[in-house]
Amino acid sequence: MDHDKVGQFLDKFAADLAATEAAGSAVLGHRLGLYRGLAEGPATPEELGGRTGCDARYLTEWLRGQAAGGYVSYDRVTGRFFLTEEQEFCLADPNGPDVSAAFLIALGMLRAEPRIAEAFRTGAGFGWDEHHEDVHLGCDAFYRPAYLASLVPHWIPALDGVVAKLEAGGRIADVGCGLGSSSVLMAQAFPRSTVVGSDYHAGSIEEAHKRAAEAGVADRVTFEVARAQQFSGTGYDLVTTLDALHDMGDPLGAAKQVRQALAPDGTWLVVEPYASEDVEENFTTVGRAYYSGSTFMCLPNALSQEGGYALGAQAGEGAVRQIAEDAGFTRFTRVAQTPFNLVYEIRP
């Protein structure tokens, strides 16, 4: 045994343990508005307590731990903690990536660990609707900034002729819409178009209705509780399925439903997690996060449904292409990608 390699492994373990424990602190920052409070300017624990209504002694421990992890910065001369411009953008900017929300997803999914352990033994599924609400809220909070930054500015414009249709007044179906953030964003960007969002989780659809009303687009955005294989309507110019196809037990049934719901010249926009066809190329930090999330959320959800598929979050382009072809689509193009997503244009 190489003791130097043992030491290297233990260093990795210590980093992972610290990061795992720190997830709770990041969620506290998210729930209690601590990052937003610190974004107002450098602060001692007492000063941050005045801004946020939180106890200074707890904040002392929290701030020191956040500084140790590089999420917060520290000025030893003044004894104040602060956020750099980059930290503020990632943690406190309403239009930033809101990375603390990802920890909300993580803690939410880990609440299901006893049930997932049992599923390992039985092969049974565990539905999205069975997860703690932190999973639903965290996913929306984490993915919304990415959709804000990319869906309307980049991904839809990458589709052939779609922007012109939506600007003139098109019909959009947002399948697997969750809490409706993507539906609302598209309605705001294309005020002459209408959007129908659908999701099988009734609690998410209830929240989606509220958010559309708050955004002032409820007259052009409607929502329905429906599985992807059964959403209503036809003649859609655009159908979107964002970070959802791999979660389904029957993605082929969903693809067939999309094909019959599209207008003859309609487009299906599918956004999936970034994954390589070569499994070893997914042995990265992002791949590790996706495999963990898939183990607790994506795979169990698919296994809880009929259909016989269990793609997982790292299925890759080939699996999505095969589903599209089996459903009768003839054109399949990767039109964009990010470090986290692959974006496909699929046409009849």
Image: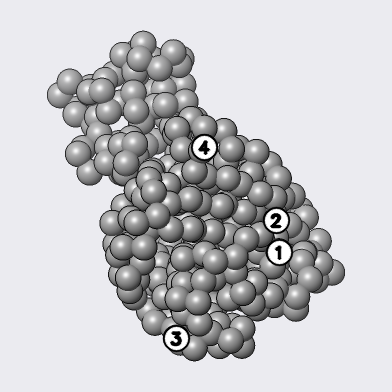
Q: In this view, does 110 lie above or below 80?
A: below
Q: What element carries label 1?
A: loop
Q: Nearer the viewer, residue 326 or 294?
A: 326
Q: Where is residue 244 in the image (x, y as percent from the top left)?
A: 57, 63
Q: Mark 3 points at which residue?
A: 331
At horizontal 79% and vertical 71% (from top left) the residue drawn is: 306
- Visible in this render: residue 5? no
Whichever of labels 1 and 4 marks the residue nearer the N terminus, that label is: 4
The answer to whether 66 is drawn above or below residue 262 in the figure is above
Residue at the image point whose x is 66% and y is 60% from the top: 231
Instruction: Read off the residue under disc 4.
Output: 218
Question: Whole-Å distance between the Cαs marked 2 and 3?
Answer: 27 Å
Q: How far apart are marks 3 and 4 (CA)?
A: 33 Å
Marks 3 and 4: CB-CB under 8 Å? no
Side (left or right) of 18 relative to 178: left
SS at mark 4? Answer: loop
Residue beneath disc 2: 226
Earlier sequence position, callout 2 versus callout 3 = 2
Residue shown at the point (70%, 56%) measured from the top left: 226
> Which of pointers 4 and 2 indicates the residue nearer the eye?
4
Amino acid beneath label 3: Arg
Report the residue marked by disc 1.
230
Cα separation, mark 4 vs mark 2, equals 19 Å
Q: Quadrant of residue 169?
A: bottom left
* Tag 1: amino acid: Gln
